[in-house]
Amino acid sequence: MKILVINGPNLNMLGKRPKEHYGVLTLDEINSLMLKNASNDTELRFYQSNYEGDIVTKIQESLSSIDGIIINPAAYTHTSVAIHDALEMFSGPIIEVHLSEVDSREDFRKVNFIRSVSTKTFAGKKEQSYIEALKYIEDILRK
Ligand code: DQA
């Protein structure tokens, strides 16, 4: 099964961002951890961008070539109708991931354009949120 892992703006700066919310690992280290935890029959593809339109294009290009999407849209979670609309066209499972507990932080982070098109959300467990998302999506895709 092919799973696309999308990370949005500023997640390329992990390691330099507030550790109490985002932990200490870099994005490369999180990606490696996912690779280590992936099943033998899982093919992970990683994509990070700071640009909303590039994320939209990546989702469009993946609509028929990918079985599942794990996405941390970062700040675009709270602003992006465009990413919502692109994800809405995807027929497989979409797992929303956040390192921090987005729902109990500032009010502006409680606005969420991605939740309604997501199959499930994992948040607040730093890098473990990604691992839980990976296990969950593998289980769905295996059924
Ligand atoms: C984040 C939470 C967002 O509110 C924030 O803008 C991020 C990262 C998280 O993983 O906790 O950049 O998606």
Image: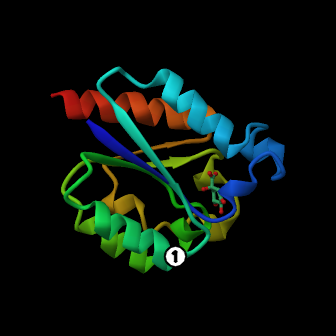
Q: Which residue has dot 1 on it?
A: 52
Residue at horizontal 26%, vertical 50%? Answer: 66
Residue 15 position (above or below residue 74) = above
| Quarter of the figure that contains the C terminus | top left
Residue at horizontal 49%, vertical 66%? Answer: 112
- The one nearer the camera, 100 or 17, is 17
Q: Quadrant of residue 11?
A: bottom right
Can residue 115 be seen in the rendering of this structure? yes
* x then y, percent, for residue 90: 23, 61
Q: Amino acid at mark 1?
A: Glu
Left/right of residue 109 with respect to residue 60 in the rendered view: right
Can residue 125 be seen in the rendering of this structure? no
* x then y, percent, for residue 128: 58, 31
- The one nearer the camera, 115 or 89, is 89
| Quarter of the figure that contains the N terminus | top left
Residue 78 position (above or below residue 116) = below
